[in-house]
Structure formats: C-alpha cells, structure tokens
Amino acid sequence: SRSKGSRLTFRLQNCRDNFQVAADFYSILKKDFKNISYGDTVKISIPSVHEKYLNKGKKLLQVFSVEGNQKIYLNYYDSIRKYNSFLMKFIIGLFLIIGVTALYYRHKSFPPKRKQTMPVQ
C-alpha cells in the first residue's frame, strides 16, 4: 500500500491469501463493511498482475472492490479513479523534484560569468 499508516486486511474462507484494502480507499469504503460475517458470500477484485499469487499465501493482495449481501462496499470504479489520481500526483511531484534538482545542479556547475570592464582612457 502507498499509505503506510494503517491498513485493513482480511482472509476469505478456503483461501490461503491475505487481502488488503489500502488506507487510500478508506474514504470510499462503506462503513457497514465490518458487518460482513463469516460464511457470507463476497466478490472481490484484485489487479490481474496478482492473479499468479492467488492461493499461494505468500503475498498481501490489494483489493479494488468488495461486494456481497446485495451491497457494494468498495466500488471498483471509485477505487481505480482514486488510485490513478494518486499516481498522477506522484508522477507530477516526481518530475517537479527532478526538474528543480536539475536546475539547481546546472546553475551550480555553470556559474554566471563576470562582466569584464574595460578601463576608460
């Protein structure tokens, strides 16, 4: 998860994996998510790149949607939108830092030339 402060993890019956709802998604996660009981049927969405880790029990798998009991607890489209907006902010911030750093070091390695004055006769 990108947010290191807290995370919500859960397991599904008959599955060895741990699943995680990132702290970035807490604001869009429905409050009654904690009312899901053992034995309830739920449907989750994970990134396709994590499919190879399913039922291996070795990796914490990021969840982008949770549905069950005729309710949507975490909406897939809202999660993707939130994830991508963070990614864009990160990329813009990274380019800004690289640009300022490049300007600083360029200015430092090429100091401005002094004007030469000619003596008046």
Image (cartoon, rainbow, N blue to C red):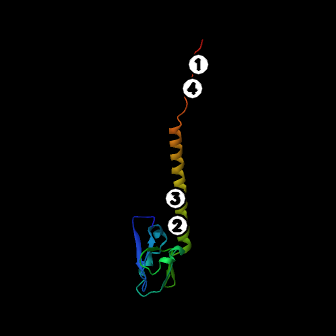
Q: CA distance from mark 4 to mark 3?
A: 42 Å
What residue would you read off at disc 1? 118
Q: CA distance from mark 4 to mark 1?
A: 10 Å
Pointer 3: residues within 10 angstroms few (<14), some, or many (20+)? few
Q: CA distance from mark 1 to mark 2?
A: 62 Å
The x, y position of residue 114, in whole percent, is 54, 28
Kind of residue at badge 2: Tyr
Q: Pointer 3 and pointer 1: residues touching (CB < 8 Å)?
A: no
Pointer 2: residues within 10 angstroms few (<14), some, or many (20+)? some
Q: CA distance from mark 3 to mark 1?
A: 52 Å
What residue would you read off at disc 4? 115
Kind of residue at badge 3: Phe
**In terms of sequence position, does the residue under pointer 3 or pointer 1 come before the other?**
3
Q: Which mark is residue 90?
A: 3
Kind of residue at badge 4: Lys
Relative to 86, say whether 38 is above or below: below
Specify whether 111 is left or right of 15: right
Q: Which mark is residue 83?
A: 2
The x, y position of residue 98, in whole percent, is 52, 50
Q: Secondary structure at mark 1?
A: loop
Relative to 104, say whether 60 is above or below: below
